[in-house]
Image (cartoon, rainbow, N blue to C red):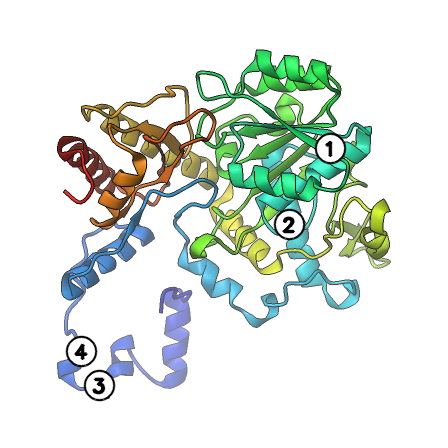
Amino acid sequence: MPYVPHADEDIRQMLAVMGLDSIDQLFDHLPANVRLGRDLDLPLGLSEEEVRGWFRCAAARNHGQGELVSFLGGGVYDTVIPAVIDALVSRSEFLTAYTPYQPEVSQGTLQAIYEWQSFICRLTGMAVANASMYDGATALAEACAVAVHANRKLLVVLPATLNPRWARVVRTSMRGSGIQVSEAPAGPQGTIDPDALKKLLASAPAGAFVLPNPNYLGLIEPVDDLAAIAKAAGATVIAAVNPVSLSLLKTPAEYGADLVVGEAQPFGIPCGWGGPLLGFLACTDEQKRRIPGRIVGRTVDNRGNNGYVLTLQTREQHIRREKATSNICSNQGLNMMRATIYLSMLGAGGLAALGEANRVRIEALRTRARAVAGVTIPFDGPVFNETVLRLPKPAAEFRAFARSRGVLAGIPLDGVAGCGANDLLVAVTEKRSAAQIDQYGALLAEFAAVGGKGK
């Protein structure tokens, strides 16, 4: 059982009902040769994740096969998921994902959605958030459509530093709509080039400018300057964020974003081969009637009790064909519940500690990589969660080399934001231990020394 919610008093009461004196008596019927007969030989003072790691290592020793250690990122991250999340979200009353229309029988679900929206508003500094979106990429495409419809300028500017998969989704979504998409180039530091952006926006009126922070390379963009340039040109600013980073960085509201989107998968949702995911979309008060999806509001009934209802938008708003900004009306209910439980468990202090843990670990990996001859860090600005390493040989070769040793080394970046064949995107989350970061550094050193695939 991965999660046992019973306190000592709960256990005492259960044993009293059964007429037993101890938990051990529950297992008296089992033969002695199948019982351990002693406490587990666990070190003292371990966290939940460290206990899991201890058992994984024990299983690897017994079966001769270790667990793959992941340094993959690029929008989906291998993170610590507390056992309490699965224990709570698997309750039967949470398993219906669709947004409820009948508030008189759906107060629990509606309140959960309201709490999720409140978390997103607090994280982003925005006035309104919707129930949820399919994923971060589709949330961005929807935000671009909202921005273009709001100011009637049929051009969306995407930076070269945006997640390339998100950029493809936006381009596909805009196809056939009359909305054009252009790209703002990256500068030599791996962030958006402000001068090039200014020239681009001066040459054509843009309805939306997408500002990723951190960007796809893990770098922190100069958000104040870029947002000011976009706003001076009359473009709506859409921030695309890693929500974990908001525990350390400026909120999008602080640098003037009009809409905010992101991927909430790091909030208690497993990688699952790239899904399922959980997009979010938040906005200023001015944009609240244009955003897609469902919005839950809190009111008071005729007895003075709190009540939760769908608000601001009609059900039919999203099925008006060409007049609709979107046809998305479902929400990712079960994943939203996971993320809400996760944030409730962490609290503000826990979220700040999580962000700091991510920052410390990626800096530890950068320090370890700098010590390896032949490996460089081409973009040396501040980063969050991930960094670019420039290797002495093609990144695809190192990926195969590391995979044969039980490590998923990262994502090759050839052709992304000016990167070449030797550039690798490496992610480090709170789940990676100091020993695993050292192991990664040792693999880099071994690869640089032998310089080859399969050696």
The mark found on residue 30 in the picture is 3
- What amino acid is labelled 3 in the image? Leu
Mark 2 is surrounded, within 10 Å at the Cα level, by few (under 14), some (14 to 19) or many (20 or more) other residues, namely: many
- What amino acid is labelled 2 in the image? Met
Q: Nearer the viewer, residue 19 or 182?
A: 182
The mark found on residue 153 in the picture is none
Between disc 1 and disc 3, whose residue precedes?
3
Q: Position of residue 118 (x, y in %)?
A: 65, 44
Disc 4 from disc 3: Cα separation: 7 Å
Q: Nearer the viewer, residue 443 or 278?
A: 443
Give the labeled residue for mark 4: 35
Q: Position of residue 285 (x, y in %)?
A: 77, 34
Q: Nearer the viewer, mark 1 or mark 2?
A: 2
- What amino acid is labelled 4 in the image? Arg
Residue appearing at x 39%, y 49% in the figure: 80
Give the labeled residue for mark 2: 133
Q: Nearer the viewer, mark 2 or mark 4?
A: 2
Between disc 4 and disc 1, whose residue precedes?
4
| Left or right side of 266 for 372 | left
Q: Secondary structure at mark 3?
A: loop
Q: Quadrant of residue 437?
A: top left
Q: Position of residue 430 (x, y in %)?
A: 36, 41
Q: Nearer the viewer, mark 2 or mark 3?
A: 2
| Left or right side of 180 for 392 | left
Give the labeled residue for mark 1: 284
